[in-house]
Amino acid sequence: MNSARVRAFLPLFAWIVALTAMSGSLYYSEVRGFIPCTLCWYQRILMYPLVAIILVGILRRDEGLPLYVLPLSVLGMFVSTYHYLLQIGVLTETGTCKAGVPCTVKYVNYFGFVTIPFMALTAFYLISMAMAAYWFMRQQDV
């Protein structure tokens, strides 16, 4: 696969990841009945707009797409990393998670380490890497 084809695929890959993350989030809350904690809501606030932003960027063939996506996806990586570290006990819970559902609740725990914040972290990471690769490949073509 040549460089131009890979570069053209990266935004589509990022969009599929964002759409899957959003769909999974809605499935867990609306179908399974899991109540999102405060940090879950922050992650949703950062992920959900990415579905629309990336799709519009793809349709418009916007070369500057990483400039819109990376701030949200990198911030999402920080929030989900913090949330995951709270869940596994590396950090202690702060005032952010005191009201409502505790941020340490593990609704799912696949393979002993894959929780919802871990899945969000993976999605934000994949989106960030796809957009960074798209940006660097674009810079090399100039």
Image (cartoon, grey):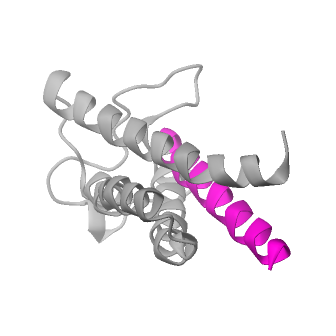
- In the picture, the quarter occupied by the N terminus is top right
Residue 92 on image: x %, y %? 46, 59
Q: Is residue 81 left or right of residue 42?
A: right
Residue 5 on image: x %, y %? 73, 47
Is residue 45 found inside the magenta-colored segment of the image?
Answer: no
Range drawn in magenta: 118-142
Viewer-nearest residue: 112 or 131: 131
- In the picture, the quarter occupied by the C terminus is bottom right
Q: Decide: is 28 above or below 76.
A: above
Residue 88 seen anywhere in this rendered image of the structure: no
* Magenta: main secondary structure: helix
> Residue at (55%, 68%) from the top-left corner?
74
Q: Is residue 40 left or right of residue 6?
A: left
> Residue at (54%, 70%) from the top-left corner?
70
> Residue at (48%, 68%) from the top-left corner?
69
Residue 53 on image: x %, y %? 37, 63
Viewer-nearest residue: 81 or 93: 81
> Residue at (56%, 71%) from the top-left corner?
66
Residue 112 on image: x %, y %? 58, 23
